[in-house]
Image (spheres, helix red, strand yellow):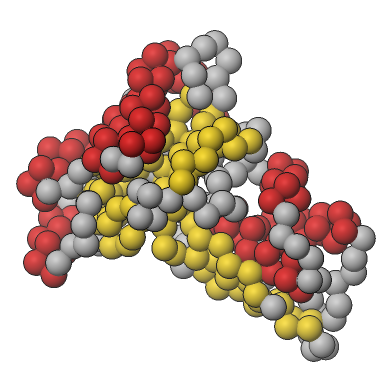
Amino acid sequence: MSGVCHGTLGELYQGPLRAGSEPDIAVVSFPVDRHSWVHFTPGTNEPNRLPLGEKTATAARLFLEHFGVTLPPGRWDAHSDLRVGVGMASSTADIVATLRCLFRLFALPYDNDVVLGILTAIERADSVFLDEFALYLSGRHRVVRRLGTEIGFHTAYITEPGTVDTAAVTDLLLEHYRRHGEEYERCLTDLLKGFASGDPAAVARAATASAALSQNVLPKATFDSMLAHRERFGADGVFVAHTGCLIGYLFPTRLDADAKSDLSAYFHTLGHQCSFAQGGYG
């Protein structure tokens, strides 16, 4: 049995849901065609210990307790395309892939409410358990609005050095949101209008505005250069992992070999290897 879950390339928006003195952290995650896989092979004599760490082990335990079932003897295996600690939602994707594997193993109908309940008990999460964009309160684990599957981008991105502990910067973020609530509110309004009208360029502009606001609290070293060169490369916008290390360009169409070569050369001058991936849907 297997379970699979996609990751993210950071977010198209991260900020308060609305301006106010007690903001929640709201995100519109940017799904990417990169995945976490979890496999379980029943009937072997090997130890059935999950290879993905404490959080996935906790998720499996909570699942078994919820349904009152016992894991049979067997072997876990896992694989992931998602880098840890850079903003690709690797931890949440591992948990969701594990739960999907367990639903299939026990022939139980997949239940998002169960998944949300287990995530709530473990960590602040992204909305990777959905196969569409969503405005999501990551701390409360509440889907505020589903945003569909009409919008998609091609991306060129890099990973700056280091990792970010999301939990450790939460208070810093909330204070930043309190100071810039009205700017974030305008940004989110523009983003939601872009999704509602199916306008990728409008979504990309709002994502760029969200990334620019993030520079005031968790800055990316290459942001100013990338913003200055956006039009040169024909990108619609810039996106970031707001509490991670990713930054990249949003393109409306697939990049040809010449465009990829030019982008790779540019990022190389900044000291980074460029990657390409399809984000969103559309």
Q: Which residue appears farthest toward the bottom when viewing the image?
A: 44
Q: Height in image: 201 above or below 43?
A: above
Q: Is residue 74 at least partly visible in the picture?
A: yes
Q: Residue at x 65, y 33 (%)?
A: 140
Q: Which residue appears farthest toward the right when viewing the image?
A: 68
249 and 245: which one is in front? 249
Q: Height in image: 34 above or below 87?
A: below
Relative to 136, is 3 on the left or the right? right
The image quadrant where one finds the N terminus is bottom right
Q: Residue at x 46, y 20 (%)?
A: 177
Q: Quadrant of residue 202?
A: top left
The image shows a total of numbered marks equal to 0
Q: Height in image: 13 above or below 96?
A: above
254 and 138: which one is in front? 254
Q: Is residue 160 at least partly visible in the picture?
A: no
Q: Residue at x 61, y 61 (%)?
A: 94
Q: Height in image: 14 above or below 267?
A: above
The image quadrant where one finds the C terminus is bottom left
Q: Which residue appears farthest toward the front when viewing the image?
A: 197
Q: Position of residue 97 (x, y in %)?
A: 63, 64
Q: Residue at x 13, y 55 (%)?
A: 266
Q: Position of residue 175 (x, y in %)?
A: 49, 18
Q: Position of residue 247 (x, y in %)?
A: 31, 47
212 and 27: which one is in front? 27
Q: Position of residue 61 (x, y in %)?
A: 82, 59
